[in-house]
Amino acid sequence: EPEVTQTPSHQVTQMGQEVILRCVPISNHLYFYWYRQILGQKVEFLVSFYNNEISEKSEIFDDQFSVERPDGSNFTLKIRSTKLEDSAMYFCARQDRGQTGELFFGEGSRLTVL
Amino acid sequence: SQQGEEDPQALSIQEGENATMNCSYKTSINNLQWYRQNSGRGLVHLILIRSNEREKHSGRLRVTLDTSKKSSSLLITASRAADTASYFCASVLIQGAQKLVFGQGTRLTINP
């Protein structure tokens, strides 16, 4: 049983369109993360979310990105106006023990921007 | 600078042999973790070693940490075809943000 469920598994969108990626943690946890992986490259940190607030974000996470936990369960990543270079796998992860423990990742959402 | 670089980038061995992957990092860490990723799938946590530990075992996995050399190694013994995957090290820094910083990964292929 997956620890974290992500939807959609694959989304194709036109450049400039808005995209919302969703993550549903199975258990009630406080620490969540979004990472992305461009094909063939390393896994890059985007943003961490603690107690319903952004705790840290990377340089990649510019004004085009936002995160929310609108209903206390779903955890969403929104890209307002997609660019070609946003094409990547986006992974949601939760963390159990503070901010230094292991991460439990979802299977990822593959975003293709045309 | 890169925090977490794996070596080699790719490794191909025969089933039954041992596979060793190395990871180097640049700044002081709280702990170092190894993850596995099958092609197109999510990352799966394998093992965590804290900065005050030198060696840790989990099944066929053995991880070492040398903080003086800022390096870690992952040994998979008696490899199986199912071990074919990419392996990433990830570190949690002592200072600054507590996020995990991943390396480039080692692509391991086990030939039957």
Image (spheres, rainbow, N blue to C red):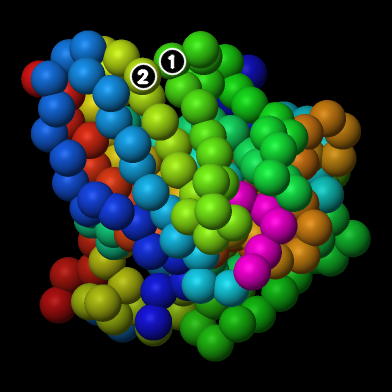
| Magenta stretch encompasses residue A29 | yes
Neighbour class for label 2 at 10 Å: few (<14), some, many (≥20)? some
Secondary structure beneath dot 1 equals: loop
Could you tell whether B39 is left or right of A21 in the image? left
A1 or B59: nearer the viewer: A1
Mark 2 — residue? A80
Query: Which segment is the magenta one?
Result: A28-32
* Chain identifier of the residue bearing label 2 in the image: A
Q: x%, y% of residue A79?
A: 37, 25
Q: Quadrant of residue A106?
A: bottom left
Q: Main secondary structure of the magenta part?
A: loop
Reading the chain from its start, which is encountered first: label 2 or label 1?
1
Quarter of the image for the C terminus of chain A: give it.
top left
In the rendered view, tell whether residue B108 sits above or below residue A59. Answer: below
Mark 1 — residue? A64
Q: x%, y% of residue A63?
A: 51, 12
Identity, as a three-letter code, of the amino acid under mark 1: Gln
